């Protein structure tokens, strides 16, 4: 984002801060501040021109570190300053993908509003929707289903979001709701795993009666 579009808070904070020791030191300080949710320090460091996209030894940017800690205000400042919501680390996590997978709802909303790449995939070849379903983050699932994300994307394990919700879920109320949401959003219930087993067959094998009912109805 151009410097003139930074918030007044960020610019004034930068003017109040002394000259940087070095660009590298400031970048490390920004990552540290983001990781611990120190929004004021994040604002000050951005205000003096610290790089938003510097990486630590694991390839994590300040925004990804803020997302790890669910530090919403620090993440907001970084995103509004132009931090890349799609910047991946060494294991293919990005702020957007991590927020989706771990149910960091407020940060997920911000990444979706600032150019999240819905086609981006994690280290398992899954979109943000698949781990959101796996981990039972129903609010994240609903948010993603409002986007143009590929609901039937198949990851490297051979699983769609629907398969993952059935195979890795516990069949309880949260996963029943997720399966129902996926079905009503148009998920293809006939896509089988690598062994040719469908979501309905998995649900029946695991004794998930309510999920089986939903999938039976959807397959008519």
Image (cartoon, rainbow, N blue to C red):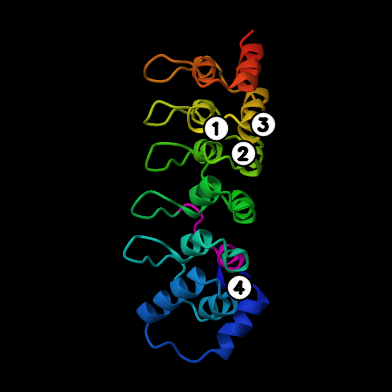
* Magenta segment: 76-86
Extreme residue toward the top, this view: 220
CA distance for labels 3 and 2: 10 Å
- As drawn, is 212 to the left or to the right of 190? right
Q: Residue at x 38, y 55 (%)?
A: 89
Q: Secondary structure at mark 2?
A: helix
In the picture shown, does residue 169 fall above or below 210?
below
Q: Residue at x 49, y 47 (%)?
A: 97
Q: Residue at x 56, y 84 (%)?
A: 14
User: Which residue is tagged 1?
Assistant: 170
Instruction: Work out whether residue 92 or residue 35 is closer to the camera in this orientation and state it.
Output: 35
Crowd around label 1: few <14 · some 14–19 · many ≥20 (10 Å): some
Q: Residue at x 37, y 31 (%)?
A: 156
- As drawn, is 60 to the left or to the right of 78? left
User: Which residue is tagged 3?
Assistant: 177
Q: Look at discs 3 and 4 and give the one toward the viewer.
A: 3
**How far across and down, in percent of the image, does residue 37 sit?**
55, 71
User: Which residue is tagged 4?
Assistant: 4
**How far across and down, in percent of the image, does residue 153 sit?**
48, 28
- Marks 2 & 1, CB-CB < 8 Å contact: no
CA distance for labels 1 and 4: 50 Å
Q: Secondary structure at mark 4?
A: helix
- Marks 1 & 4, CB-CB < 8 Å contact: no
Q: Disc 2 or 1, which lies upstream in sequence?
A: 2
User: Which residue is tagged 2?
Assistant: 141
> Which image quadrant is residue 136 in?
top right
Q: Look at discs 1 and 4 and give the one toward the viewer.
A: 1
**How far across and down, in percent of the image, does residue 57 sit?**
31, 65
**How far across and down, in percent of the image, does residue 111 sit?**
58, 53
Q: Secondary structure at mark 3?
A: helix
Q: Secondary structure at mark 1?
A: loop
């Amino acid at each position: 984002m151009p410097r003139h579009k930074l918030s007044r808070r960020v610019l004034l904070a930068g003017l109040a801060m002394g000259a940087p020791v070095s660009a590298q030191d400031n970048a490390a300080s920004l990552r540290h501040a983001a990781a611990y949710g120190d929004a004021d320090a994040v604002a000050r460091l951005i205000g003096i021109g610290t790089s938003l996209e510097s990486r630590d030894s694991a390839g994590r940017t300040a925004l990804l570190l803020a997302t790890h800690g669910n530090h919403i205000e620090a993440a907001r400042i970084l995103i509004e300053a132009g931090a890349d919501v799609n910047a991946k680390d060494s294991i293919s996590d990005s702020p957007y993908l991590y927020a989706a997978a771990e149910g960091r709802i407020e940060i997920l909303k911000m990444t979706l509003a600032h150019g999240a790449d819905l086609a981006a995939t994690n280290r398992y070849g899954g979109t943000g929707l698949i781990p959101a379903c796996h981990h039972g983050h129903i609010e994240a699932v609903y948010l993603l289903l409002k986007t143009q994300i590929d609901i039937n994307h198949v990851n490297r394990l051979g699983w769609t979001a629907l398969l993952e919700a059935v195979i890795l879920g516990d069949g309880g109320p949260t996963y029943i709701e997720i399966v129902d949401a996926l079905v009503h959003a148009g998920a293809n219930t006939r896509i089988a795993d690598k062994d040719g087993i469908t979501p309905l067959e998995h649900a029946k094998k695991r004794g998930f009666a309510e999920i089986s009912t939903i999938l039976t109805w959807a397959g008519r």
